[in-house]
Amino acid sequence: MHEMSLAINIVALAEAECRAAGAGRIRRVEVEVGGLAGVMPEALRFCFAAACRETMAEGAELEIIVVDGQGECASCRRPAPMAEHFALCPACGGLMRPLQGQELRLAAIEVD
């Protein structure tokens, strides 16, 4: 389950930002997770709660914003939504190239 290592890194980044801001506690963390990133949001939520124990983020809320996959056909260059890697273009059947939806980004942190 790679979500645990992701959660640990999210907490570490949030703690570094919290310290840099001179704050003492992390109340809320917002992350953007691409639909093509291979991250299971509920598993990330579970792992985040465990990773927060005995840190500045203990008890913090995690908001996960899922970014839909979007791609462009390598053949005809038409944009189209992508629900999975190696999707085929709905217009010509060519292989789609992902443009959006592979990211995992720490978007915001709310601190006290």
Image: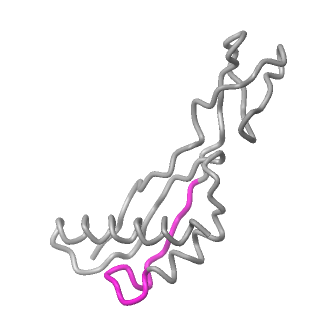
The colour scheme is one colour
Residue at position x 48%, y 58% from top?
A: 31
Q: Where's residue 54, x and y in %?
A: 36, 90
Give the answer, above or below, for where 1 lies relative to 104. Answer: below
For the N terminus, the image quarter is: bottom right
Residue at image point 57% right, 55% down: 65
Coordinates of residue 99 in the picture (x, y in percent): 58, 30
Specify whether 22 is left or right of 91: left
The residue that appears at 56% across and 61% down in the rendered structure is: 64
Chief secondary structure of the magenta portion: loop
Residue 58 in magenta stretch: yes
- Report the magenta residues as a range: 52-65
- Residue 54 among magenta residues: yes
Q: Is 63 above or below relative to 67? A: below
**Residue 23, quarter of picture:** bottom left
Q: Say which quarter of the image contains residue 47.
A: bottom right
**Residue ID at (79%, 22%):** 89
Q: Looking at the picture, how far across and down is residue 67, in whole percent?
A: 60, 46
Using the image, determine if residue 3 lies above or below residue 25: above
Q: Nearer the viewer, residue 18 or 2?
A: 2
In the figure, is residue 47 to the left or right of 13? right
